[in-house]
Amino acid sequence: MKNLRYHFLALLVTLLVAGSFLSSAKLSAVINPFSLTLLRFVIAAAVLLPLVLLKKQYRTGIRKALPRGLVMSLFFSVFFICMFAALKATTALNTGTLYTLVPFMTAILSLIAFKEKIANKMLFIYLLGIAGTSWVIFAGDINALLAFSLNQGDAIFIAGCVSMVCFSISMKLLYRGDEMVVVVFCTLLGGAFWMLLALVLFKQPTQWHLLNTSLQFHMGYLALFATLASTFIIQKITLVLGPKKVMAYIYLSPVFVAFLMWIIEGQSIPTVVYPGMLLSIAATVILQLQNTTEENSQTFISAKFFKKGEAS
């Protein structure tokens, strides 16, 4: 498969994001979402700052990239706020289910932004992926699936999912060949700005003193891995693979969450969810192959048209 290493990076970032759901669930019960999101951006930006200051080309690139970083970071920040806020009113089960809508939403917005059409085959694959992740989340219990209902927290998280899609689309639209370190730093800096503004406008306390040793570990993971590392990787792979391919890996998120809970918390993976895992994996692989086929077709058509123009 073309760009294989970027697909491995997409798997890695999916794993990092899956871990963030576990850490976020523990932190959201203690500190308000604006403060949590501000702290994770501040820590991540502070870690990256020495590297940015080290090179003159990085320092001079900030002024050019910062306005676009503010736009991208707004969408990024809204997603995290919605996730923290939603976990106060709904369950990880519901948010995990709703998160699988992101690839389909990305395809819809890509249709608007990049004129990328959705074939009936692709629609079926998206539904297959949603079915697979739902099987994993509900452990094959049809009664639990039928009992699923939306609440206020779910509505908040749906808004966050839309914002995450906009973040992915904006990365593709707003990239201007800047150094990736500068883009990531400006995104983190912009995120910290939006969160600080939100804290002031909504008069929310920081509550950082409530973080005990265990919660500090979870915050460190969110800041350094689920924010800094994942932002850097997402920025890079989205430019190479495109938003649809990157977002297709979201179908694997519940699978990774299940494995992380097994490894970290010792929770066994029920045999009944294995078919759902296989469906999720199959949907992800098929989506990648289908997107690659579409790209190759478009490249062939463009090349043929270009040669025809040269001949005339």
Image: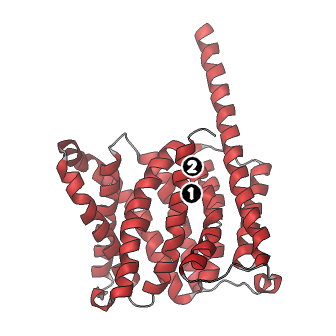
Q: Amino acid at mark 2?
A: His
Tell me which residue sits at (30%, 57%) in the image. Answer: 185
Tell me which residue sits at (33%, 69%) in the image. Answer: 41
Badge 1 local density, few (<14 within 10 Å), some, or many (20+)?
A: some
Foreground of the two, 271 or 211: 271
Q: Quadrant of the N terminus?
A: top right
According to the image, label 2 marks what residue? 7
Tell me which residue sits at (65%, 67%) in the image. Answer: 100
Tag of residue 11: 1
Q: Is residue 5 left or right of residue 35?
A: right
Foreground of the two, 269 or 48: 269
Question: Relative to 269, is 66 above or below?
Answer: above
Alpha carbons under labels 1 and 2: distance apart = 6 Å
Do we see residue 312 in this rendering? Answer: no
Do we see residue 48 in this rendering? Answer: yes
Helix, strand or loop under label 1: helix
Residue 135 appears in which quarter of the rendering?
bottom right
Foreground of the two, 76 or 28: 28
Tell me which residue sits at (34%, 58%) in the image. Answer: 187
Residue 303 appears in which quarter of the rendering?
top right
> Decide: marks 1, 2 in contact (CB < 8 A)?
yes
